[in-house]
Structure formats: C-alpha cells, structure tokens
C-alpha cells in the first residue's frame, strides 16, 4: 500500500499562519490550488483579502514565469505589507507549466532589497518561498 499524498492543510502549518492574521492574496488565477487557499483561510480563520485599508501580516503572491519580472512583483506586493510582515511566493514546481526557478526568485528578491529565506512544499503543484525585508528594514 502506497502512502497517501499530503493534503495542502497538512503542510500549511509550515507557513507560520495563525488565527487573526490578515493575509492578502495577489496573482490569483484559475490555476491556483483552491484546497491550499482554503487551508490558509482555515489557518487564519478569515477570508483572503485582495485590497486592504490596513497593514497586512502576510502577502500570498502567486507567481508564474509569464507574470513578469519577479522583482517588480515583489516590490508591488510590499504596498500593504506591515513592517514585520512577510511574503509567501507561490510558484509552480519544477516541470509544471509556469515554473519559476529558485535562482530567478532569489535574484528578484535580492534586486528588490529583500531576502529569500526558506522554501516549503505546500501542495502537489506549488511550492512556497518565504521572502522578508532585511532586519534593518522591519519595524
């Protein structure tokens, strides 16, 4: 008997989300993993927001190769992000349509004055990559 594949909710705990956090979602399209989105909403006990009139704790940024320059996408995602907040860049895994290489993500983060810190296998088709401001830039 083969082991079952992890469900998105099984790995979402690695994203460091907690009830009450405000999570902004950018880059949504019909190819995103709806089970993962639901697991994230369950973890924060709230809906994901597109636009916010307050600082958000986390930005969930879906990025595909055709979406444009990674640095520009990351800089745009900082608009509503609170000082201690962070970005989870979700990109298709290797071999999936739209895959963005780890090197491109790291280069885009560095060029934007940010740091790519860790990666998490969150679901079957998408990986999550944590991007933060340098410690001196957090308030």
Image (cartoon, rainbow, N blue to C red):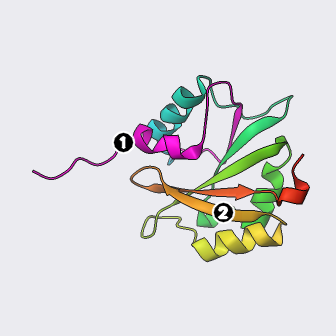
Q: Which residue is mark 2?
A: 117
Q: Which of the 4 image quarters holds residue 65?
A: bottom right
Vertical placement of residue 48 versus 100, above or below: above
First of labels 2, 1 by sequence position: 1
> In what element is the residue under mark 1?
loop
Counting from the top left corner in percent of width and height, residue 129 is at 60, 58
Q: Which of the 4 image quarters holds residue 105?
A: bottom right
Viewer-nearest residue: 92 or 18: 18
* Magenta stretch secondary structure, dominant: loop
Viewer-nearest residue: 69 or 111: 111
In front: mark 2 or mark 1?
2
Residue range of the region highlighted in magenta in the rendering: 1-30
Q: Residue lying furthest front in this view?
A: 135
Viewer-nearest residue: 19 or 107: 19
The answer to whether residue 68 of the structure is visible from this angle is no
Q: Which residue is mark 1?
A: 7
């Amino acid at each position: 008997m083969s082991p079952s594949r992890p469900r998105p909710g099984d790995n979402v705990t690695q994203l460091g989300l907690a009830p009450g956090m405000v999570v902004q979602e950018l880059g949504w399209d019909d190819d995103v993993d709806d089970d993962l989105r639901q697991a994230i909403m369950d973890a924060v006990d709230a809906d994901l927001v597109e636009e916010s009139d307050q600082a958000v704790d986390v930005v969930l940024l879906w990025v595909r190769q055709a979406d444009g320059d990674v640095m520009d996408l990351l800089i745009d995602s900082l608009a509503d992000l609170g000082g201690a907040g962070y970005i989870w860049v979700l990109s298709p895994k290797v071999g999936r349509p739209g895959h963005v290489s780890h090197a491109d993500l790291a280069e885009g983060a560095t060029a934007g004055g940010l740091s790519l810190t860790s990666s998490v296998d969150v679901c079957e088709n998408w990986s999550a990559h944590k991007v933060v401001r340098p410690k001196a830039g957090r308030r």
